Amino acid sequence: MTKILLLSDSHSYIDDRILEYARQADEIWHCGDFGSMEVIEELEKIKPLKGVYGNIDNAKIRAEFPEVNRFFCEDLEVLMIHIGGYPGKYTPLTNREISAKAPKLFISGHSHILKAMFDQKNNLLHLNPGACGKQGWHKTRTMMRFVVEGDEIKDLEIIELGPKN
């Protein structure tokens, strides 16, 4: 059993609430737009960090994280792309990656809109944790957490961190 904290679009912002949830996880997954190395360093001090770079991330962050991250957590295959789209409206990159081999879990960020959707066509779960930072048009800062057990996703929770201002 692996406890995951899933976040995206921190845009250089991190606070004690995010860090407290990070301490409760076994792994932290960040779906891009870190915004600064300081966010990465704070999270890496706490738990192992997996992620992808986002469109606002600089060359240093892009050297540290890939555009596409495909990995296993226990027996669960995960695909992560910052600008990925949604079921039925995937980006060309996402379509290529899913067509090559569909994962069981696809994660994207970028939109600042929290969504959990099942893609029946590709038989996968799509998650977007929204935005945990304060930059952007969203009103409420959000993250997700869940448990991976074997190849199953369990106990999915939405975490509302409050208004961005």
Image (tube, rainbow, N blue to C red):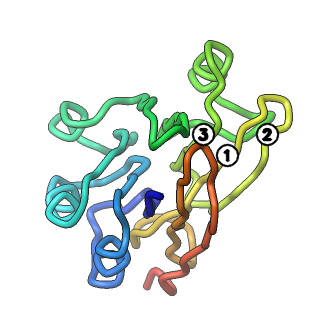
**x, y percent for residue 163:** 51, 85
Cα–Cα span, label 1 and label 2: 7 Å
- Describe residue 95's horizontal placement relative to residue 31 as left or right: right
**x, y percent for residue 76:** 55, 39
Furthest residue in direction right, as rendered: 120
Q: Which residue is mark 2?
A: 119
Which one is nearer the viewer's eye here, 69 or 93?
Answer: 69
Question: Label 1: how many residues lie within 10 Å, few (<14), some (14-19) or many (20+)?
Answer: many
Residue 73, numbered label: none
Circle 3: residue type: Phe
Asked if the residues shown at circle 1 and circle 2 are in contact, with their CB atoms under 8 angstroms apart, the answer is yes
Which one is nearer the viewer's eye here, 22 or 138?
Answer: 22
Q: Residue at x 76, y 38 (%)?
A: 87
Asked if the residues shown at circle 2 and circle 3 are in contact, with their CB atoms under 8 angstroms apart, the answer is yes
Q: Residue at x 60, y 39 (%)?
A: 106
- Describe residue 129's horizontal placement relative to residue 46 as left or right: right
Give SS at disc 2: strand
Of callouts 1 and 2, the N-terminal one: 2
Asked if the residues shown at circle 1 and circle 3 are in contact, with their CB atoms under 8 angstroms apart, the answer is yes
Of callouts 1 and 3, the N-terminal one: 3
Q: Residue at x 28, y 79 (%)?
A: 15
Give SS at disc 1: strand
**x, y percent for residue 88:** 80, 34
Question: Label 2: how many residues lie within 10 Å, few (<14), some (14-19) or many (20+)?
Answer: some
Circle 1: residue type: His
Vertical position of residue 160 compared to residue 42: above or below: below
Vertical position of residue 120 compared to residue 143: above or below: above
Circle 2: residue type: Asp
- Residue 64 seen in the figure: yes
Furthest residue in direction top, as rendered: 100
Residue 126, numbered label: 1
Residue 106, numbered label: 3
